[in-house]
Amino acid sequence: MRYGIEALNVYAGIAQISVPDLFAGRGLAPERLDNLHMRQRSVGLPFEDPVTNAVNAAKPIVDALDPADRDAVEILITSTESGLDLSKSVASYVHEYLGLSRNCRLLEVKQACYAATGALQLAVGYLASGASPGAKALVIATDVALVDERAAYAEPATGHGAAAMLLGDAPAVLAVDPGAFGCYSYETLDSARPTPRFDIADVDRSLFAYLDCLAGGFADYRSRVEAADFATTFDHLALHTPFAGLVRAAHRKMMREHAPEVEVTGDFQRRVAPSLVYPSLVGNLCSGSVYLALASLLDHAEADEVDGGARVGLYSYGSGCSAEFFSGTVDAGSRRAVAAMGIGEALNRRRRLTFAEYADLLSQTSRVLVPEENRRVDLDAYADFLPVGWTPGQATAGRHPLLVHTGTKDYHREYEWR
């Protein structure tokens, strides 16, 4: 039996800002644009939060299931840095609005940008154990951005949205290689979210920790997988992408250490570059980042390099820090499964914001995680942010409404479909 990702979808909001426009608006040095390798970044709107992002990512997947498979979803795990409550999980709301069975385990996990991978591996292990034959799990990485001018060059690289993965024994997207993983973790303060209104980051410490954990995670992978080679074992690579420029640097470092005889630029273009198309249009999706990269890879790699079967090396890093390098296989069915979600088309439909519009929104979007006893979100004030003809969550299975956050009543968060 093989286990892994049966379906994968990404929701990256309905608005974006051009990264050059953001650089100009903030007065950032334009020569540093090439280092980021970013073109656009997704921007959250005041009626979007971790719940709406998670539901809007997962709904096309859930709606495509027949009733028996929907009832087979026995585990729902949300991974987030954007928790809404110190007790109640985001998963509780997500479970309700996805209409899943009440015979379902609900969990929320946190370890910065690594958490979804930890959840995936633990869920796959449970499914493979045979404890509940035929069971499925739904893992959703969901976050919102709280960055503003205080974040400096991290602001243009920070994304918004969610990645949803259905796990089971029919892994149409990615069959996870059993026992093929390497972990590397230690305590460091390279970034944090100390309050529900802003992030802090030690950029240099974070970059070095990312590179250190990639080397350490792959070394642990090699200790478990005989003859594993960074240059030849993996047909493609999908790495956690805080910004695409860091992935380029990480690939160059690993190739110099493990395959100094290989021409780095050509290897990068073939094995890595297809995974960076969507991240360069969305920004860092936190623990959904590596799965956004996987979706990008499957939508942009040359068909003849995937269709006959290919092995993908994946690297997940979370500040704080914890990381894992693991692998799995994809094929032509993987490309078809991801293409059916229409992720690229949804990104193209996002409304482009001016810098003035973006700056005006920040005072409202920065409140989205703050607990308030009673609050109303004026949806009509943001009606023109919905592009003409936009269809939320469009997939081949049909049209899906958009879940929006409408406010709180007695601290209970309220939502409705639009």
Image (cartoon, rainbow, N blue to C red):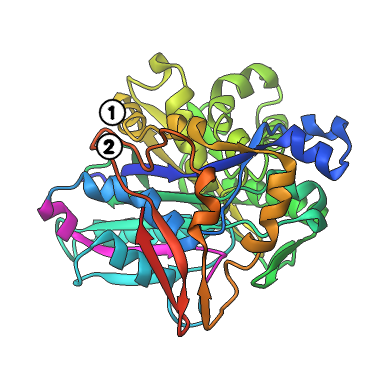
Q: Are marks 2 and 1 in contact (CB under 8 Å)?
A: yes
Residue furthest front as drawn: 380
Residue 331, visible in the rendered structure: yes
Residue furthest top as drawn: 304
The amino acid marked with disc number 1 is Gly
The residue located at (15%, 60%) in the rendering is: 71
Q: Secondary structure at mark 1?
A: helix
Residue 13, visible in the rendered structure: no
Q: Quadrant of residue 390?
A: top left
Numbered range of the magenta stretch = 67-84
Q: Which residue is mark 1?
A: 333
Query: Does 217 lie within the magenta span?
Result: no
Badge number at residue 172: 2
Disc 2 versus disc 1: distance between alpha carbons?
Answer: 6 Å
Of residue 213 and residue 64, the one placed in the foreground of this image is 64
Check the image and report above or below for 86 versus 382. below
The residue located at (81%, 58%) in the rendering is: 150
In the rendering, at what x and y percent does residue 313 appear?
A: 49, 37
Check the image and report above or below for 302 versus 344. above
Q: Secondary structure at mark 2?
A: loop
Q: Is residue 289 left or right of residue 361?
A: left
In the rendering, at what x and y percent does residue 343 appear?
A: 43, 34
